[in-house]
Amino acid sequence: MKLLRLGCLHFSELPEEWEKWRGTIGGIEIGTIGSNRTEKGVRLIVIAQAEMKYFPKVTAQGLAVIPEKLRKQLEGCIETMGNLISLSIRGRRTISSPTPSIALLPENDEERTRLAQVHGFSFLPGNRCETGSLIKFSDIGEYLEHLQDRLDGVALLVESIAHEHLTGKFHEYIRVFERAFRLSSKRLIAPLADFLCTSAFQYSAQEVENWILNIRHPITHADERECFLLESDVRPVIRRVEQAAYDVLFNKEMWRNPQSNRRDVWQPPFGTNSTNGDIFITQGFEVNLENQILDEFQAYPLDLQGIMKNIPIEWLAFPPSEIRASGQVTVKPKPFSEAESSITDPIERDPNQAEAPA
């Protein structure tokens, strides 16, 4: 039996000879099964496939469990092929998932009989609707005085804005933290966590440790480890890291210093306040949020235009599952000063009349 992982490779420009190809990378078969050109560029639908050592585990509900290790190997092959094409044409590539994104291919009658009892695939629970705040400052001049001692941090944050790739953004956010605290690696964890845990955004020491130890090093270095991380590994945390970088830049009291004291210069009117997709908005403020639906594995964005209409009859694939956002929305009241300024006294008073004694 084979496991099939499908992906969409997007390029702004692509020579026609790249629209149809097939090959093998590290024992994994990969090739195109479709393409289309639009004004925005070219989409290639590719499939990576490999033999499964064992029949997949089936739950009591009749759901087949997709082996994670093999699935990630297939995703790595898709990314590698996208990188090779990108290198060949010197062009940017992006990756998304079509529908279906995964399938099983039986190779004999016994496998077909056993798969006939499978009613779907089992996916780990998680938030498939990624929400992030698009932070802008129409009144940036009002903050200039507070940013004078940390213009280097402004420069690093702008570097992150210039990046379109999530790994590049993550690098720059970490550099903001390192610059602000004058620390790096493990020594950065405690003071950064102490600072962020005093915010209203529900950060935790474990969350910060995950950024620095489990993601930062393997996303940055590829020298000693057998494996290294890619964009899909950064995606689940990038929104929280971004918000933290803005918080550090504006609200850290002493720049280029390991201390964790906070000042109150800027508070976002909307954003994320948990790792589970929870968001907050504030009354009286325009909300500018960006939503991205992810595939079943939360590895890549779901390509809403990449729906396969003619699925090969020999594949075991299933229609799209219901997509739910797991987070909650919290509505915060207006800041006290603004709420007060909007209240008018309905009682008209005679300025010449003295107040009655208490």
Image: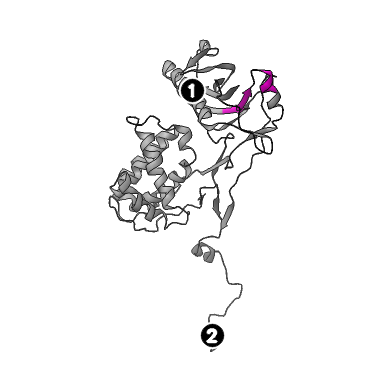
Along the line of sight, the residue nearer the viewer: 341 or 76: 76
Residue 134, compared with residue 356, is above or below; it is: above
Q: Which mark is residue 325?
A: none
Q: Residue furthest top?
A: 17
| Residue 244 highlighted magenta (yes or no) | no
- Residue type at mark 1? Cys
Whether residue 264 is visible, yes or no, is: yes
Which residues are drawn in magenta? 97-112
Residue 211, compared with residue 200, is above or below; it is: above
Along the line of sight, the residue nearer the viewer: 246 or 44: 44
Is 318 left, or right, of 179 in this rendering? right
Instruction: Compute the Cα span from label 1 to label 2.
Output: 81 Å
Residue 278, compared with residue 73, is above or below; it is: below
Closest to the camera, between mark 1 and mark 2, is 1
Q: From the image, which quarter does the N terminus lie in?
A: top right
Residue 78 x, y percent position in the rendering: 50, 23
Residue pictured at 48% horizontal, 43% vertical: 239
Residue 350 x, y percent position in the rendering: 57, 80
Along the line of sight, the residue nearer the viewer: 12 or 71: 71
Along the line of sight, the residue nearer the viewer: 73 or 133: 73
Question: Which label's residue is closer to the chain start, 1 or 2?
Answer: 1
Residue 90 x, y percent position in the rendering: 42, 19
- Pointer 1 local density, CA inside 10 Å: few below 14, some 14–19, many at least 20: many
Residues at badges 1 and 2 in contact (C-beta under 8 Å)? Answer: no
Q: Which mark is residue 77?
A: 1
Q: From the image, which quarter does the C terminus lie in?
A: bottom right
Whether residue 158 is visible, yes or no, is: no
Q: Residue furthest bottom?
A: 357
Mark 2, residue position = 355
Q: Secondary structure at mark 2?
A: loop
